[in-house]
Amino acid sequence: MHTEAVLTVLKNLQNQICAALEQEDGGAVFARKEWTGKLGVGETRVLKNGAVFEQAGVNFSHVKGSKMPASATAHRPELAGAAFEAMGVSLVIHPKNPYVPTSHANVRFFIAYPEGGEPVWWFGGGFDLTPFYPFEEDILHWHTVARDVCAPFGEAVYPEFKKWCDEYFYLKHRGETRGVGGLFFDDLNRWDFDTCLNFIKAVGEGYIGAYLPIVAKRKNTPYGERERDFQLYRRGRYVEFNLVWDRGTLFGLQSGGRTESILMSMPPLVRFEYQYVPEEGSPEARLNEFLTARDWLSEMQ
């Protein structure tokens, strides 16, 4: 299995994404922490208190274990107990300006080594957007890039992975999506190895083209205490999803990964308010119209 090729793609993506984010921020740089744990190695990069990004984390990890964690075998019970190898890049961006959406992306690769059987490999990943004050043109751009990333791999890929994203990033206890979606895929081995690897490379690079034009357009929008309070309140939903539903968080914790790196996705500041209801007709109440699965490209083009 060509694990070295995967590692090269992942490390290059980490470098590309960090360089692009530093350039957009205009001065701040990522602090780097190389770490070694009981299961493997990684490099955590975090940018804090930048001009544009309040906190941005871009993590790389490469771990091995003697037994697959339960979160990784929930959909593959036949691999329970198998040795495994996993590697990936995961990032979460929390901007300062409430008019700039939060974003997330990750690409990953797994190999399981069932006793007495052939190795089983698959890829996963995607990207999604979480606005506080949504703009239809931004959502259209985001999903247009997502569609274009998928197009060379087949016309059915974007609708399938867009639907999967809507279903995965859904807060069941709130009855709302985390944001306006994007792409999500797992168990990807439908194509040959090189095609699957090229797809995750396209997703990682596509994230930059999807997100940074939105950041550039919104980062200088004036805002006040009201918008900031709402941003911090809505960040609470991000915390809820990552700690209650996210399989990546569970996998990292169950596999004995580096806790600081796993929880880097948490926003640096957040506000919880009991039974908060936005004022009817307000910009804050408008967000509710966007927290449901919608066919954005058909509706907005």
Image (cartoon, helix red, strand yellow):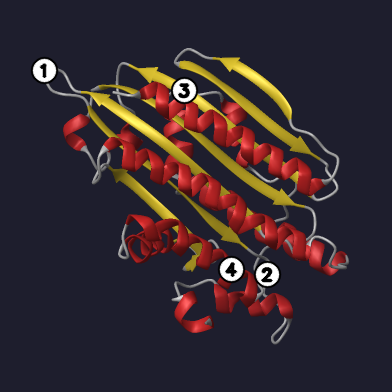
Q: Position of residue 244 (x, y in %)?
A: 48, 47
Please tell me whether mark 3 sits on a helix, a strand or a loop: strand
Which three-letter amino acid code belongs to the residue tagged 3?
His
Residue lying farthest to the bottom in this orientation: 281
Given residues 28 and 169, the one toward you in this image is: 28
Q: Position of residue 41 (x, y in %)?
A: 52, 17
Between the C-alphas of marks 3 and 4, the distance is: 33 Å
| Camera sees residue 262 | no
Residue 116's disc number: 1
Which callout, 2 or 3, points at the residue further toward the start of the chain? 3
Residue 276's disc number: 2
Residue 39's disc number: none
Please tell me whether mark 1 sits on a helix, a strand or a loop: loop
Please tell me whether mark 4 sits on a helix, a strand or a loop: helix
Q: Position of residue 134 (x, y in %)?
A: 66, 72
Which three-letter amino acid code belongs to the residue tagged 4?
His
